[in-house]
Amino acid sequence: MMMRRRMLAVMRATALTLSIGMLGSAANAQDAYPRRPVRVIVPWGAGSGIDVQTRVFVQAFGEALGAPVFVDNKSGAGSLVGYQAAVQGQPAGYPLFVGALAPRT
């Protein structure tokens, strides 16, 4: 429970930091970033642990950014479909990718 709270706090802080950095001095300009939606590719199914954490991050990130941010689940083949979508896909908006590393034992 404590680890989950810590992870959520880190994700919120990251979203705030990213949004402040991206807005910068162009916040008042009409052509300010982002002009297109931000798409976050998740290579796992909806409802998975990573998906739920990403959706919490995306909500905070979208609110801080003031732009539409959405999750695009691309599950299948042990997450290979999502990785391929991130690498080879046509950018519709601003694509971001959520990956995970397994700890070495």
Image: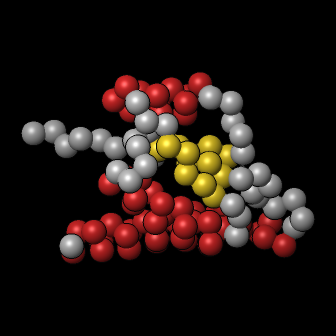
Residue found at x 19% / y 43%: 103
Q: Give 22 or 49, whichever is nearer the viewer.
A: 49
36 in relation to 66, above or below: above
Q: Give 88 or 28, whichever is nearer the viewer.
A: 88
- Residue 92: which quarter of the image? top right
Q: Is residue 13 left or right of residue 101?
A: right
Residue found at x 39% / y 60%: 53
Task: Pick the quarter of the image with the N terminus.
Answer: bottom left
Residue found at x 55% / y 33%: 86
Q: Give 73 or 36, whichever is nearer the viewer.
A: 73
User: Residue 104 at what x, y percent from top left?
Assistant: 16, 39
Q: Is residue 43 left or right of residue 103?
A: right
Q: Is residue 99 visible?
A: no
Which residue, as the protein is rendered here, is positioned at the far left? 105
- Residue 16: which quarter of the image? bottom right
Q: How many marks?
A: 0
User: Residue 47 at what x, y percent from top left?
Assistant: 38, 53
Task: Pick the quarter of the image with the C terminus.
Answer: top left
User: Residue 46 at what x, y percent from top left?
Assistant: 43, 49
Q: Is residue 23 left or right of residue 64?
A: right
Residue found at x 54% / y 70%: 60
51 in relation to 18, above or below: above
Q: Is residue 89 left or right of residue 32?
A: left
19 in relation to 40, above or below: below
Colour approach in the figure: secondary structure
Q: Is residue 95 visible?
A: yes
